[in-house]
Image (spheres, grey):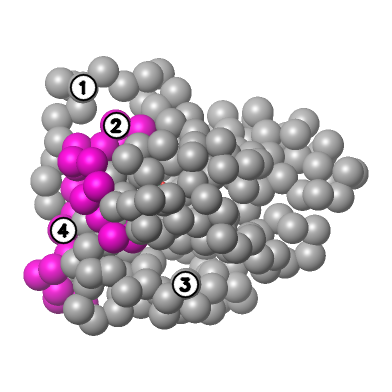
Amino acid sequence: MELHDFSMKKISQQTEHTRKRYNVSSVVYDLMEWPVEWIWYNKWRKLLWKKVEGPNVLEIGIGTGKNISFYPKNIRVNGIDLSPKMLERAKTVLSNYPNERVRLQVMDVQNLDFPDNYFDEVVATFVFCSVPDPILGLKEALRVTKPGGKLHVLEHMRSRNPLFSSMMVKLDGPIHYLSGVHIARQTVENVEAAGWKIEQVKDLTMGGIFKRIKATKSH
Ligand SMILES: C[S@@+](CC[C@H](N)C(=O)[O-])C[C@H]1O[C@@H](n2cnc3c(N)ncnc32)[C@H](O)[C@@H]1O
């Protein structure tokens, strides 16, 4: 695992806040997520990774490595995350699924250390709720993707139900302060605003809170 030196890179206060929050929650993250993982996330991850052909894949915000067991054979993955502590956990998971084609790096999606047009596909599961500037991160993901390459996203976002939506907007600030997570983002709109061409948006739960988004980089 490579630890990029954050002291050398200028990162915003907000990004530092997010990194600290995930460093702290890394200890309990898998335990906290266990119920939703069991009810929903696991099966959504499995379906998502069935569609990934690679061969050269970027996983943004790999976290504690919950997707690693679903990686198809014959793909190469660069798994990046802002939080070294989350990545330490991913490293342990990777040791149970030894794969020399997977490389873990501490990196900020808002400032990727990869050349233009480098990856065939990019995956992000439950990440753009936390990235301080999601449009900047999605633009960086677009930059490093080859023309015709794909973006696969699983995400929770602002409900389309007006009552839930206004509650989510009100609670967004305090929840973000405590956890680093924004609950009222409009991620489909953000993906589009970053320049991706939306191919499919699928509601995974009622109210449109959880969605699967597929997008491509136009030629
Ligand atoms: C809710 S967790 C999801 C982890 C994993 N993708 C999953 O499906 O379980 C969000 C992850 O995004 C990472 N993250 C947040 N902002 C980021 C950024 N700017 N660059 C890279 N990773 C970031 C966090 O450190 C955290 O590990």
* Magenta-span inclusion, residue 47: no
Mark 3 or mark 2, earlier in chain: 3
| Disc 2 and disc 1 in contact, CB within 8 angstroms | yes
| Disc 3 and disc 4 in contact, CB within 8 angstroms | no
- Whole-percent x, y for residue 57 in the image: 27, 61
Dot 2 amino acid type: Asn
Tag 2's secondary structure? helix
Image point (29%, 31%), residue name:
111
Mark 1 or mark 3, earlier in chain: 1
Q: Is residue 37 left or right of residue 109?
A: right
Examine the rendered structure and indicate whether residue 170 appears above or below residue 157: above
Closer to the camera in the image, 38 or 193: 193
Residue 88 in view here: no
Image point (25%, 55%), residue name:
119
As measured in the structure, the alpha-carbon distance from the residue carrying label 2 to the one carrying label 1 is: 9 Å
Dot 4 amino acid type: Arg
Which residue corresponds to mark 4?
103
Q: Is residue 88 left or right of residue 100?
A: right
| Disc 2 and disc 4 in contact, CB within 8 angstroms | no
Which residue corresponds to mark 2?
111
User: In the rendered image, which quarter is residue 38 located in?
Assistant: bottom right
Mark 2 or mark 1, earlier in chain: 1
| Disc 3 and disc 2 in contact, CB within 8 angstroms | no
Report the magenta residues as a range.
97-122
Tag 3's secondary structure? helix
* Mark 4 burial class by Cα count in 10 Å: few <14, some 14-19, many 20+: some
Q: Nearer the viewer, mark 2 or mark 4?
A: 2
Image point (23%, 41%), residue name:
116
Examine the rendered structure and indicate whether residue 81 appears above or below residue 98: above
Q: Which mark identifies residue 48? A: 3
Q: Which mark identifies residue 9? A: 1
